[in-house]
Structures are given as structure tokens and as C-alpha cells.
Amino acid sequence: MRRIVVAGGLGFFGATVVERLRAEGAAPLAAARRAAADLRLDVEDPASLRLALRPADVVVDAVGPFQDRTTALAEAALEIGFDLIDLADSRAYVQRLLPLGPRFAARGNRLLTACSSVSAVSAALVRHSGVRAPLRVTGFLAPATQYAANPGSGASLLRSVGRPVQVLRDGRLTTRPGWRDTRALTMPAPIGRMVGRLYETADPLTLPAVWPSLRTVDFYVDSRVFGLNPLLDLGARLWPMHWLLTTFLRPGLAVARRLGSETGCLAYEIEGADGQVARPALIGARHGHYTPVAPAVLAALAIARGEFGPRGLVRASEYVEPERLIGYLDRYAVRLVTLA
């Protein structure tokens, strides 16, 4: 098996990737700037990257917030010759990587960007739905905040609150105010009815590259923490409230973990050109935070074992087979259900 390096391996999602890879029999190296890491690594320092990484490595990038990242790690992948998988949740970051696709193809290496809930799970559930020519893909997230509230996800959430975000509407990328638009969806118990707020993801970039028929791609989040949605609504409209939420992020996360939901859900409405509408949802308690890292874990294992075919800029629909992803999550009681 090729060497697997998890950049940001001491953070919340990076440590979860390391844990899941070890559970599958791999021996990943947790890489970070801190001395406690298996491998000292700074993803923004080219000299550090050249010193730590090797040709033929499989690197899983979990260093957030991706909104603040440069393309230094991807450039190092091209220079050194390793495969790169990232958990990017930032549309702007993914957009900066997309032009590097031809260079990855010429080098013979792989780039799997946004290999997380978005866009890997999104693409897998669209494939699984059987809708062949989707016109609309709308995502909904109700996180299991008791387990998943962490500084990285909190900071990422605030980047969409009241800020301009891009969605696909009428076949074009359109800017909308984040967290202002709302959409409701009824989930099975214990979640019930949720009201999501508009949140920016990479899906409007990655999914139309797979399904050119798409005219609408957007994503909505409900914090599922008592009293938090109204505060975020104020933060979307009033700069002082946004500043307070940012300043007191860490104590706010502690409150979210105490008051938040134990059960999380990631759901989609997928509408086809023939009028068919599919509503698949992944629901789970305790291990719901495995969902965002599962595609990267499975892709890294497949590449390291020589079982992954595509090279260059890999399309989101090729990151992981839907049945394999669904079966993997089912082992941890994250169940796929169909909403009415």
C-alpha cells in the first residue's frame, strides 16, 4: 500500500480521517505544523511540502478554512508527483484548483477536490437516485451538532452568513446573499421539519460538469441548535452581530455541543427533466460526522491499493461508487432513507 498522509491530521475532520483509515487497516501519517504530528507539514510553505512529501504519496487535505487557502499544496502535488484529495467546502478554493486539471492529467496524477459531503456525497446520491437528466439538485444539512460543532465548521458557516454566495439558477452562476433565502423540508423523526438557510458550496461548480442538464444547484443548512438560527439571521443582516458571533465562536461552539442535536441528516431533492423528484437522505446519530470524511477515506484507500482508475481532475461522480459509500456508512448506522 502506498503511503497515505493526512494534512491537518490533528484537527477535527483530519483526525476523523486518520481514525477511519486506521480502522480499515491502513497506517496513515497525521501531518500538521504541531510537534505532536507524525509528520511536520505546513500546507502553505513550499519548502515544507518538498521536505515532507514524496512521489506516489496519497495526500488527504483536511486543513481548513479552505476559504483562506492558496493552491500551494496542489502545485506541490504537480511538482513532486503525488495524488491529492481535499475536503474543501469553499467554492472559491475549488474554482482556483479547476484550471490545474490539465496539468494533473499530463503529470499522470489525480486531483479529487471537494471530496466530502459536497460534492462527493451529492454526486453519489444523484447517481443512486436514478434521475438521469437532473434539472435541479437542492441539498439540505441538519448537522449532529453535539458531535460536529468544531472551530473549522463554525468558521466556514459564518463565511456564508450575510455574505454573497454563488448558486446555479437558470443554468448560470448567480450571486445571492447567504443565509437570507430559506427552504423547508420535512425529515423523519427525530428531526422533523427543518428550515434551511442558503449556504455556499462547491456543488454549483462540480455537479454541472457531470450533468450538463442541471439548471439549479443550491444548498441549505439548519443549525438545529435552540436559538442559534435567529442569532445567525441577525448576523446575516447586522454587521455588529456577525462580528460578535465571530469573536465568540469558540464559547458558542461549546454551547452548540451542549444544546445541539444528536442526530444529523444530509438530504437532497433531485428533480429530473421528466418531472421525477427523488428525495434521498442520510440520517444518523453519533457517527453522522463520518459522512463528510467517508468519500475521502474510501478514495484514499482505493488509490493506495491501486484500485482507483481515473487520473487528472477526477469528476465528483467518480470519487466513490454510490453502493460502496452507502454500505460503508450503513456500518456506522448512518442510514439511507427516501423522503416522501
Image (cartoon, helix red, strand yellow):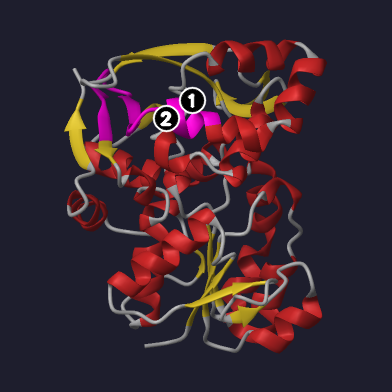
Magenta range: 255-282
Q: Is residue 210 above or below residue 244?
A: below
Mark 2: which amino acid? Answer: Leu
Name the residue located 56 percent from the left edge and 81 percent from the top edge.
38
Q: Nearer the viewer, residue 171 or 3?
A: 3
Q: CA distance from mark 1 to mark 2?
A: 5 Å
**Residue 56 rendering spot, x and y as whole percentages:** 52, 87
**Residue 141, numbered circle:** 2
Name the residue located 79 percent from the left edge and 73 percent from the top edge.
45
Mark 1: which amino acid? Answer: Val
Question: Contact (CB < 8 A) between labels 1 and 2?
Answer: yes
Q: Nearer the viewer, residue 6 or 212?
A: 6
**Residue 156 rendering spot, x and y as whole percentages:** 63, 39
Write down the residue under mark 1. 221
Dot 1 alpha-carbon crowd within 10 angstroms: few under 14, some 14 to 19, many 20 or more: many
Look at the image and tell me whether residue 314 can be seen: yes
Q: Nearer the viewer, residue 76 or 288?
A: 288
Name the residue located 69 percent from the left edge and 16 percent from the top edge.
236
Of mark 1 and mark 2, the one earlier in the sequence is 2
Name the residue located 58 percent from the left edge and 89 percent from the top edge.
55
